[in-house]
Amino acid sequence: MKDQINPNYPDIDFLRTRAKERIPRFAFEYLDGGCNAGVNLKRNTDDIRNILLKPYYLREIKEVNLQTELFGHIYDAPFGMAPIGLQGLMWPKASEILAKSAFDFNIPFILSTVATASIEKIAEITEGQAWFQLYHPAEKDLRNDLIKRTEQAGLSVLVVLSDVPSFGYRSKEIRNGLSIPPKITLNNMLQILGHPNWALSTLLAGQPSFKTLEKYIPKGMSLKHLGLFMNKTFDGRLNLDRLKEIRDLWKGKLVLKGVASEEDAQKCVELGLDGIIVSNHGGRQLDHGESSVSALQSIAKVFGEKIKIMMDSGIRTGPDIASSIAAGADFTFLGRSFMYGVSALGSQGGDQTALILKKQLTQVMQQLCCERIYELRERLVKE
């Protein structure tokens, strides 16, 4: 783990620009895009940045401490890495690179069911400190086996995804052949040829695949049939009965991701869940819904003392983290920012992103005269 920021890429926007240059357009658009017109993608970040914080300049401050307790573990910062599918499409071994950075920086890494590293590999890299996000399968046998593997790997936090009852309409992914079923296009091949470093790195690492799901996928499937298989396998809308069954099966900490209403938050409390992640899937599912931080504020007012409330979607920078915590989040997760980092800088990208976020957040807290994370709540400018 390095402790010095690369001065050529001192913030997330620089990493994003470099990532766009370094990887094929179809990979960047998969990472960077939202659904439909991208309205909620933009609203997520805009609403966070409309939150105002009040500084105190004549108060004494000793030392800023970013440590945050969550589910019995003391993390070194109040942010972690959100789950993203197909991470290896953006950069080879991205899941493994980011998991290693998360472990070194003592922050949580959430592995998606459809990421390009297996539960077992990420558990090994993080010494069991990672979390696993479950896309709910249509069949109970598959669900039960994924939960069993998560437990056997030693992971203690299971995150159940709730906000993908249907696949978001993402026109750029359709154009790029990344819809279900996927397809290889001539345009994609030309883009690959225009990015030889990405192409060579991908060739050496091997074609990205759904590593956690490999044991369940029939051998020799064409891309078309693989797409149809994935569509059928995860055609399982989450409901209260299914969530109750998972609560009975899983003895560790259980979190629901995709909460966007007080009604769903109330059900999580009643079912005895340990936490929720207020999220709208990074603006990739419902274009005309609320921003995550807007939903967070109403949910936190009612349930802030009843359950751990976390948030993702729209958070890009250290100041964004500070504003989200001031608005009511106990903890935050970032997806695109870390993927920009690894797409831009490869094996150094996770460390670079984590360093930027920690230094930015520390500077904001120094400016606000906050020694501990929870003091950010007192700096929120009320409307």
Image: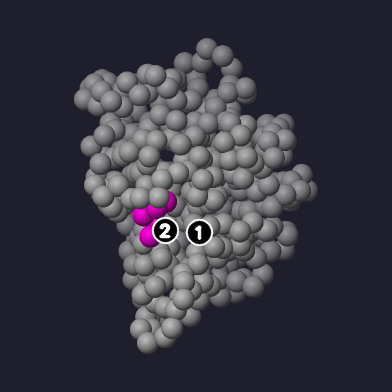
Residue at 39%, 19% in the rendered image: 204
Q: Where is residue 289 in the image (x, y as percent from the top left)?
A: 43, 59
Specify whether 55 is left or right of 209.
Answer: left
| Mark 2 lies on residue | 358
Give the magenta-colored segment's residue range.
353-359
All told, the count of numbered labels is: 2
Mark positioned earlier in the residue sequence (2 or 1): 1
SS at mark 2?
A: helix
| Mark 1 lies on residue | 77
**Would you identify the image quadrant in which residue 25 lies?**
top left
| Amino acid type, callout 2 | Lys
* Of residues 79 and 163, the one drawn nearer to the viewer in this rendering: 79
Disc 2 crowd rating (10 Å Cα; few below 14, some 14-19, many 20+) is: many
Report if residue 40 is visible in the image.
no
Task: Pick the quarter of the image with the N terminus.
Answer: top left
* Of residues 238 and 219, the one drawn nearer to the viewer in this rendering: 219
Q: Position of residue 229 (x, y in %)?
A: 54, 25
